[in-house]
C-alpha cells in the first residue's frame, strides 16, 4: 500500500466509529491508504468489520475491528482503550456512527411524535459521540497532537421536513466542535465537523425512489449526489497533519447545497 504524501498520517492510529457503514468504510480505506493504522467499529456486523480489516491488511496496512454500541454508555471508553492498548495511542477520532430513526410520516405533526420515538434518535446521535470524544481527547491532549472529525449531516444546516429530531442531534455536534475547540486547541487538538449531503451509499442506492433522487439532483448545483469517497476525502484532510490550524469549522460536502 503506497501512503498518500503530505498528510502526516503514516504510523498514526485512527478510530472510525460506524466504520462498517457506507461512508465509514470509505473513510477507513482513505486513512489506511494514507498510511494510518485504522480501527473500525461494529455493533452486530462483525463479519463486515473483519472483511474490511482483511482488505486493509491485504493492501499492506494495519487494521482492527472494535465492538461499539451506541446504547452502551461504557462502550466508547472500551473502544478507545482497545485502540490505545493495541497501538499505544489514538491520534485521530472520526465519529461516524449513526442511529437511524423512523422518519416522521407525511401528515403527522411534529408535536404528535411520542417521546419513545424521538428520544432514541436524539440520544443515540449525540451522547455517544460526546462520550467517545471525551475518552479520545484525554491522551491526545497529553501528547500535544490530535484530530477529531465529527460526521454530521446537511440536515443540521439546511433542514429537512420530517427530520427535526435527527437534525437537532446532528446540530449538537456542531455546537460541540465550536465550544470544545477553546478547551483543547492550545494543546494541539483540532475538532471539526463534516456535514455530508445525500450520499450514494450501498444502503441508499437500493432504497431511494427515483422521484426523490431526481428531485435531489435537480436541487444540487453540481447536478449529482455525493459519493462516499468524496465525503471521505474531506474527513481525511481535516483529520490529518495537512490540517495545521483549522478547528471548530463545519465543512459541507453536498455539491453546493
Image (cartoon, rainbow, N blue to C red):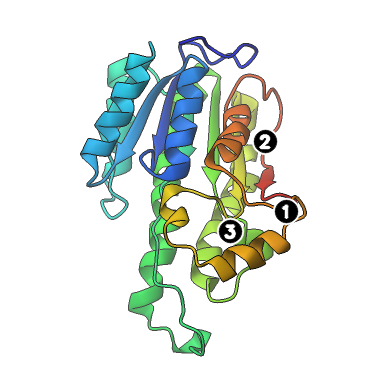
Query: Label 1 near label 2: C-beta < 8 Å?
Result: no
- Nearer-the-camera pick, 238 or 103: 103
Q: Is residue 81 visible?
A: no
Inter-mark Cα distance, 3 to 2 = 16 Å
The kind of secondary structure element at disc 1 is loop
Disc on the earlier residue, 3 or 1: 3
Residue position for label 3: 171
- Nearer-the-camera pick, 9 or 220: 220
| Numbered circle sitting on residue 247 | 2
**Residue 23: x and y, percent?**
48, 42
Inter-mark Cα distance, 2 to 1 = 30 Å
Crowding near the residue tagged with mark 2, few <14, some 14–19, many ≥20 C-alpha atoms within 10 Å: many
Q: Is residue 235 visible?
A: yes
Inter-mark Cα distance, 3 to 1 = 26 Å
Q: Which of marks 3 and 1 is in front?
A: 1
Residue, x 77% and y 54% (percent of image)? 221
Residue position for label 1: 223
**In the rendered image, the vertical position of residue 163 relative to residue 72, given as above or below:** below
Left or right: where 27 falls relative to 47: right
**In the rendered image, the vertical position of residue 51 relative to residue 167, given as above or below:** above
Q: Quadrant of residue 37?
A: top left
| Numbered circle sitting on residue 167 | none
Residue, x 46% and y 82% (percent of image)? 105
**Residue 224: x and y, percent?**
67, 51
**In the rendered image, the vertical position of residue 118 relative to residue 133, given as above or below:** below
Amino acid at each position: 500500500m503506497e501512503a498518500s504524501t503530505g498528510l502526516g498520517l503514516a504510523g498514526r492510529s485512527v478510530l472510525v466509529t460506524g466504520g462498517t457503514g457506507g461512508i465509514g468504510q470509505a473513510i477507513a480505506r482513505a486513512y489506511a491508504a494514507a498510511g494510518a493504522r485504522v480501527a473500525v467499529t461494529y455493533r452486530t456486523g462483525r463479519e463486515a468489520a473483519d472483511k474490511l480489516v482483511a482488505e486493509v491488511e491485504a493492501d499492506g496496512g494495519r487494521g482492527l475491528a472494535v465492538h461499539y454500541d451506541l446504547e452502551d454508555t461504557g462502550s466508547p471508553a472500551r473502544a478507545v482503550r482497545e485502540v490505545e492498548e493495541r497501538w499505544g495511542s489514538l491520534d485521530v477520532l472520526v465519529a461516524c456512527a449513526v442511529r437511524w430513526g423512523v422518519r416522521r410520516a407525511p401528515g403527522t405533526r411534529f408535536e404528535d411524535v411520542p417521546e419513545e420515538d424521538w428520544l432514541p434518535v436524539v440520544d443515540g446521535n449525540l451522547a455517544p459521540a460526546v462520550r467517545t470524544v471525551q475518552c479520545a481527547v484525554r491522551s491526545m491532549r497529553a501528547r500535544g497532537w490530535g484530530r477529531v472529525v465529527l460526521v454530521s449531516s446537511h440536515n443540521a444546516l439546511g433542514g429537512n421536513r420530517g427530520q427535526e429530531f435527527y437534525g437537532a442531534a446532528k446540530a449538537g455536534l456542531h455546537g460541540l466542535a465550536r465550544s470544545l475547540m477553546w478547551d483543547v486547541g492550545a494543546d494541539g487538538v483540532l475538532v471539526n465537523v463534516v456535514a455530508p449531503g445525500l450520499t450514494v451509499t450501498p444502503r441508499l442506492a437500493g432504497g431511494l425512489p427515483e422521484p426523490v433522487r431526481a428531485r435531489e439532483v435537480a436541487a444540487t448545483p453540481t447536478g449529482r449526489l455525493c459519493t462516499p469517497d468524496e465525503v471521505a476525502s474531506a474527513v481525511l484532510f481535516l483529520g490529518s497533519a495537512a490540517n495545521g490550524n483549522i478547528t471548530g469549522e463545519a465543512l459541507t460536502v453536498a455539491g453546493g447545497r
